[in-house]
Amino acid sequence: MITAERKPLEEIIACVAPFRKVLLVGCNECVTVCAAGGRKEVGLLASGLHMALLQQGKSVEIREHTLERQCDPEYVEELNSLIDGADAVLSMACGCGVQTIAGRYKDKPVFPAVNTKFMGASERQGVWAERCQGCGNCLLGQTGGICPIARCAKRLMNGPCGGSTKGSCEIDPDTDCAWQLIWDRLKALGLTENYVEMIPAKDWRTSIGNGPRKIIREDLAE
Amino acid sequence: MKTDSKLEKILAAGHLAVTGECGPPRGCMPDKVREKAKYLEGVVDAVNITDNQTAMVRMSSFAASVIVKQEGLNPLLQMVSRDRNRLSMQADIIGAYSLGIDTMLCLSGDHTRFGDHPMALNVHDLDSIQMIKMVKDMRDEGKFQGGAEIKGAPKMFIGAAANPFADPFELRVMRLAKKINAGADFIQTQCIFNVPKFEQWMEGVRKMGLHKKTYILAGVTPMKSVGAARFMQKRVPGMDVPQELVDRMASVPKEEQAEEGVKICVETIQRLKQVEGVSGFHIMAIEWEEKVPEICERAGLLPRPQV
């Protein structure tokens, strides 16, 4: 999923303070799962903003609404009945959701209330960690199901650097060395000879090297 | 011979090679490079010129290499994949070779976290092994990494690093094999303090016959003080400084610690000379270049052979 963290309240206040009526929009998907921008967080932020703004002697009317999926134009249409009553939109979705709203309501300022972080998975209650950088050409079959691009601090594709220590990355003892994990997995799978094969220089065109990416499915596109 | 590199000639002739290191200054101080180079003249066969080491901005390895070359020494251009993409690397390799630099070392580089620009983006378009392959293909196939033909291919003698002390230990020999397969002509190892562990690694190297496919230069570093020993032991990732060496440094008075560090370094070289498959030494006297002549003299590495 896409993970996010709420921005500091002061930064959000600075965005909405100039407006009288703000529509605060959450999303029921990823940001709900990582507890950054779902219905519950929308409620918490609304009351937090109310109190902080009152203390500053300002009055901003905040209308709350949480969409099923903010990155999907079909669901964003739900805002049609609320948008006219708002001077600005404050979105608690990831950057994809923020941009879907901005694209739909061209005359309304939209502000992000969260910082979109990464594609990750839950490690345990309350902990999410990066797992994928969306390089567009998945190597996981060669690397024992552990991604060196997302999980090695140097994106090394052919083995651990000289700083791998007791299973940890040199940049932080709390970060696993991706290549230690890969090696342990290859051993467990009896596939250590996979390591010998050199992974050639990456073609970054499938990743961030070729400008904004798009998927067009002719069988589905209207 | 694959190249005109002096280092290759020394190694191919079967001599124990000696390389040293010169860290470029953090400012426009070409005289500083010349001063450091002077200490190494006639003492080493090639001088590694580090590339923004510890992720701190310095005079470029390329520029400092040219200065060292002008002083009559043989620079060994270090290049890290952290700071440049494949276009920039190839451009610098062609430029360096055009100015007479024929020996280089391919590295991934210290993470920016450790330097004074932790906010910078790490490039890593290629990893160090992919970089080795690129430099080899430029030399042997006359091809750019993108596939086009190079008019006037750079003939680099290609080096790589190996750290026998990092984890997972059992993978370290295989990683060396991978670097050799990619095209590493010579290897410079991480500083060796734990000699038995290095010997264990070399045993694995010999078992795979890797010492016959590449030249392995054993890395050594003289410790200036017990403080430096402790710093390397505790703070430098992938460094293995046995407690007994730290204790030995601590056992002598402060003013004698530098001499004790040099003594340990010389003893280490003497021991490593006995290890089958060691083709030479890479002496990393960090900000202590003036000590290299004395270390080489005491270790019986002088005079340097003429080839």
Image (cartoon, coloured by chain):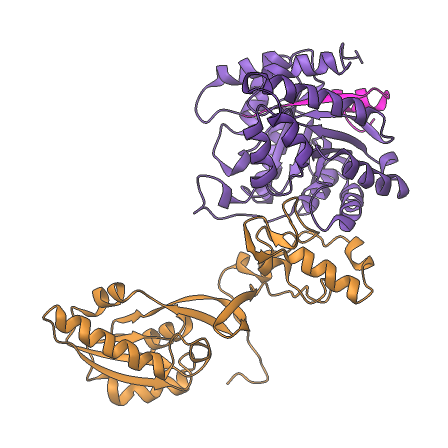
Chain colours: A orange, B purple
On whether residue B5 falls in the magenta region, the answer is yes
In the image, what residue occupies the spot 50% across and 75% down? A125
Q: Nearer the viewer, residue B274 or A209?
A: B274
- Where residue A130 appears, as percent x and y from the top left, is 54, 65
Relative side of B206 to A108, left or right: right
Work out whether B214 lies above or below A117: above
Q: Quadrant of residue B245?
A: top right
In the image, what residue occupies the spot 35% across and 82% down? A40
Q: Quadrant of residue B264?
A: top right
Residue range (magenta)? B1-23
- Where residue B190 appears, as percent x and y from the top left, is 68, 35
- Where residue B44 appears, as percent x and y from the top left, is 70, 17
Relative side of B175 to A212, left or right: right
In the image, what residue occupies the spot 15% across and 76% down? A60
Work out whether A184 lies above or below B157: below
- Specify the quadrant that holds the C terminus of chain B: top right
Q: Nearer the viewer, residue B256 or B113?
A: B256
Relative side of A4 to B254, left or right: left
Q: Nearer the viewer, residue B62 or B217?
A: B217
- Specify the quadrant that holds the N terminus of chain B: top right
- Where residue A39 appears, as percent x and y from the top left, is 35, 84
In the image, what residue occupies the spot 28% across and 74% down? A90
Q: Is residue A77 visible?
A: yes
Q: Is residue B70 visible?
A: no
On whether residue B40 falls in the magenta region, the answer is no
Relative side of A15 to B201, left or right: left
Q: Nearer the viewer, residue A132 or B149?
A: A132
Work out whether A197 lies above or below B129: below
Counting the numbered discs, the total is 0
